[in-house]
Image (cartoon, grey):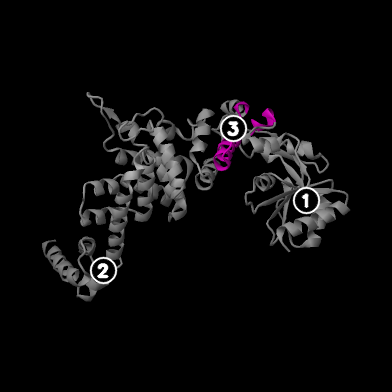
Amino acid sequence: MTDREMAREIALRVREAGGSVYYVGGYVRDLLLGRDNKDIDMEVHGVTPEALTGILRSLGKMTAYGESFGIFGLRHYGLDIAMPRSEKAVGGGHRDFLCTLDPFIGTRNAALRRDFTVNALMQDVLSGEIVDHFGGIQDLNRKILRHIDETRFAEDPLRVLRGAQFASRFGFSVSPDTVEVCRKMDLRTLSPERVFGELEKALLKADRPSVFFQELRRMNQLSFWFPEVEALIGIPQSKRFHPEGDVWNHTMLVLDQAAKLRDFAENPLGLMLSALCHDLGKVSTTRVEDDGRLHSFGHDQAGVPIAEQFLSRITHEKRLKQYVKNMVSLHMQPNIMVTQKAGKKAFNRVFDSSICSADLLLLCRADVFGSWGTEENYPPIEASLREHLSEFEKIMSQPAVTGADLIAAGFRPGTSFHEALEYAHKLQLAGVSKKEALPQTLAFLRKSIETS
């Protein structure tokens, strides 16, 4: 039995008990938008919790992962089965709500707790009838995100980020009235995990993740969680290389270009965060010469601690932060090296220092395509980079000198081993085969031991 077939079976049995079942929330919204959504949310009206649990147990193994909130499920089915409830804020946190179950509250009152009109739509599971108390269908057609009730909306500060995230994912805009409400809300009580969760959805699910930040800018809500990004606003760039405008405009364009490439990335989230952070260092390094020329020398390295500061505010994932900082520090080098006709050794050193060279080239492409008028000159540069990367990967796939080779030659592990293996690695990067590198490494190790 499919999820939808089980949903219908539940609805039939609830109807026999005098109640009704509706699809609700994002499932109905996405259904009307023609978007795939495997998370099926249902709401059961008109029967008691005891009656509902009896029905569910008769159909399979019931799970109650939110029983105090009236949320149930059935093992092996992707159904979230909830009972209508009212919510009242009792604190400033996202979880500080007093929830009261009321199976007989009615569809309108049940939908009042939703955030936006497009998320308050309901569909009768059996008849297919759409229940729209607040003009959600009209807002879907107009591509508008509009809050339902100002008092209830303002009780949950996460809704500011959800609004920006929905706008970026669905190509909607937040209504002016809702923007005004969002401007008055305090986001400081949110947990980093919640903020990161909304950011991650925007970065990985939106065709234009820049809309997330553009809407937060409209709401004046960048300052607390995204001050490093907000600082890019108004930082000038050379019109010759960046006709698109300031560093903010460039970063937003790079972010959207990176979204076109993330499916090819080994670390999609890391790539998107790297695109967001790649020019953070320009805030402190941008200078205007006496002749009016602009430059931001060293912004790649200056951006590393700023990226660390930003990321540490929203995540504890050390590997993710290390990846982004590595990408920020290297994001300029590959393209510059092609234009300067650098040698194979130089390219190999850069690729060797990169946590993910393939993703680095994706970031380089996004950076170029995020500057207006430069795209047409990039294909030969990108082809050269791909060729150099292929040569590097071929070299690194060859056998290399190892510690076992040194032990087999009669040496005992010690402090000189590390230096010797580093020397062997440099030989490999230079394209020296293991057959040639081993005697050179052994000679290096003997000399190192003799002089120590």
The residue to which callout 1 is attached is 125
Q: Would residue 165 be counted in the magenta stretch?
A: yes
Q: Which mark is residue 400?
A: 2
Q: For the residue carrying disc 2, how many other residues have a C-alpha within 10 Å: few (<14), some (14-19), or many (20+)?
A: many
The amino acid marked with disc number 3 is: Val
| Relative image position of residue 251 (x, y in whole percent) | 41, 37
Could you say whether the residue bearing mark 1 is in a helix, strand or loop? loop
Identity of the residue drawn at 65% across and 52% down: 39
How far apart marks 1 and 2 lie (CA) works out to 63 Å
Q: Which mark is residue 58?
A: none
Which quadrant holds the N terminus? bottom right
Q: Which of the marked residues, 1 or 2, is nearer the chain's N terminus?
A: 1
Q: Which of the marked residues, 3 or 1, is nearer the chain's N terminus?
A: 1
Identity of the residue drawn at 40% across and 45% down: 274
The amino acid marked with disc number 2 is: Ala
Could you say whether the residue bearing mark 2 is in a helix, strand or loop? loop
**Residue closest to the eye, 346 or 341:** 341
| Relative image position of residue 166 (x, y in whole percent) | 58, 40
Which image quadrant is residue 276 in?
top left
Residue 334, compared with residue 76, is above or below; it is above
Extent of the magenta region: 149-177
How far apart marks 2 and 3 lie (CA) works out to 57 Å
Which image quadrant is residue 177 in?
top right
